[in-house]
Image (cartoon, coloured by chain):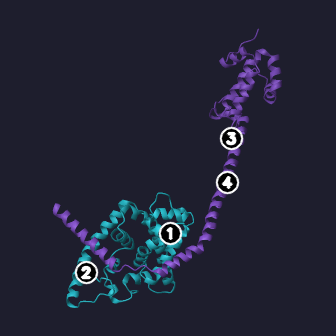
Amino acid sequence: MAGDETLTLLTDEELVERARRGCTRSFGELARRYQVPIRHFLQRKCGVREDAEDLTQETFLRAFNKLWSFREGAEFRPWIFTVAYRVALNALRRRQWQSLSENNVPAVLQARQGAGMESEEQRDRLWDRVQSVLTPLQFTVVWLFYVEQMSARDIGVIVRKSEGAVKTILCRARKVLVPHLQEFTAVFEAGMEKHPRPQIGNRRML
Amino acid sequence: MREDQRRNHRSEEWLGGLLRAAAQAERPEFSEDLHRRILRQVMQSGVVDESRAAQSFYSRQRWHVMLAWTGAAVAVLLAVLTVTSVRHGGLRFGARPNSEEVANGVNGQPENLSGGVDPSMARETELSPDRSLAVIVSTPDRTVQQLQHQLTQLESGRWAGLDRDLLIASEMVKNQLPLNLVAQIRTGEAQRTP
C-alpha cells in the first residue's frame, strides 16, 4: 500500500481506480482535495454554513457508495460536483417541505434574502447579492464557471443541460449581473471611503 | 463593432475577476474534523457498500437470467405457433366467411351451376371426398362440370386469395384426377370422354 505522500502525486482518476479496488485511503485523499470546493459550493447553494458540513459529508459518502458507477475515462471533478449538486437540491427540497409544514417562510427564501446569515456584513458580500439577483440555476452555472472555472460542457453535465443551454444561461446571467455589480461596487466603495471597515481574519470584504 | 467587443471583453474580465476574488475571500478553510468524520463514515459503510454492490450485481444477474428465460419461452411459443400455422394452413385473424355464401353472394352464381348435376350427388360429393372420387370415376361425362363447380366454389370461397385451407382443399381435389382432366377443368371445357 502506498503512503499518503505517494497518494498526493496520483491524479484524481487514479485515486478513484484505487478506491474502487478497496483502498479507502485513496478516497480519503480525494476527500481532502475536494472538501473545500464542495463545502464552499454547498454553503453558497444552501445558504446555511452548519448544514454545509453535513451536506459535504453526505456528498462524499454518497460518492463513495456510487463509486462503482463511475465510468472509466470520465473526469472525477465534474462527477463529484454532480453528486454535490444533487445533494444540495435534495436538501433544499427537504427544507422547503419542512418550512411549508411548519407554516413558515421557506428557509431557501430566507437564505436567499440573507435572513439566515450570521451578520450584516455577510449580507453585504458580493455573492449574496449575486445570489439574490440570479435564479438558482443561473447561480450554479455562474459559480461553476467563474469560481470553479469549469467548461460549459462540464457544467452541462452537472446541471443536465446542453453546452449551448449553459452558454445561454451564462450570457443572460452576465447581462443581469454586470449592471447590478457595477452599482454594488460603486456604492460599496463610496461607503468604504466614508466608514472604512476592518478586515476580519484573512477575509477580504467587498 | 470592435469597440463593443473590446468593451464586452473588458466587462467579462472585470466580472470574472470580481466574482473569483469575492469567492476566494469567503472560501472556507480545510476542516480536519470534517475530514475525519467523512473517513470514519466511509470506513463504516465500506463493508456495507461491498455487499450492496454485490447485491446489485446479483440482482442484475438475476434479472438477466429472468430475461433470458422469458426470451426462450417466447421463442418456443413462436416456434409452436409457426409450426401449427404451417400445418393447419395459416392463422385465422378473423371470422372466415362461409365459402358457399361468398360463392353465391359475391359472384352471383347459383348454387347449382351445372344444371345436369344431381343435387343429391353434389351433396354427397361435398360430404365425402372418397365418394366424390367414386362418382367422378363412374360418370366421366359429368365429371368435368361437377369438378369445375366444386373448384369454382372453393376458389371463390377464398377470401382475398388468402385462405390456405381452401387452397389446399382445391389442390387435393385436383391431385385426385388425371392430368388431362385437370387441364379440361381449368380451361372449362365440358367434353365427353370417349
Where on the picture, by quarter, is residue B106?
Answer: top right
Query: Residue A124, image x and y in percent?
Result: 31, 85
The foreground one among B144 and A113 is A113
Give the number of marks: 4
Q: Are marks 3 and 1 on the same chain?
A: no
**In the figure, is residue B25 to the left or right of B55?**
left
* Residue picked out by circle 3: B92
Q: Earlier in the sequence, mark 1 or mark 2?
A: 1
| Separation of residues labelled 1 and 2 (CA atoms) | 49 Å
Give SS at disc 1.
loop
* Residue picked out by circle 2: A184
| Separation of residues labelled 2 and 4 (CA atoms) | 64 Å
Give SS at disc 4.
helix
* Residue picked out by circle 1: A3
Of the chain colours in the picture, the one used for chain B is purple
Looking at numbered disc 3 in the image, what kind of residue is underneath it?
A: Arg
Of the chain colours in the picture, the one used for chain A is cyan
Image mark 2: chain: A
Where on the picture, by quarter, is residue A162?
Answer: bottom left
Q: Residues within 10 Å of mark 4 (few under 14, many from 20)?
A: few
**Vertical side of B63 occupied by B91: above or below:** above
Q: Residue furthest top?
A: B194
**Vertical side of B182 occupied by B65: above or below:** below
Looking at numbered disc 4 in the image, what kind of residue is underneath it?
A: Val
Looking at numbered disc 2 in the image, what kind of residue is underneath it?
A: Phe
Which numbered tag is attached to residue B65? 4
* Tag nearer the camera, 3 or 1: 1
> Does the residue at mark 3 contact the one at mark 2 (Cβ under 8 Å)?
no
Image mark 4: chain: B
Q: Are marks 3 and 4 on the same chain?
A: yes
Q: Residue at x 39, y 86 (%)?
A: A117
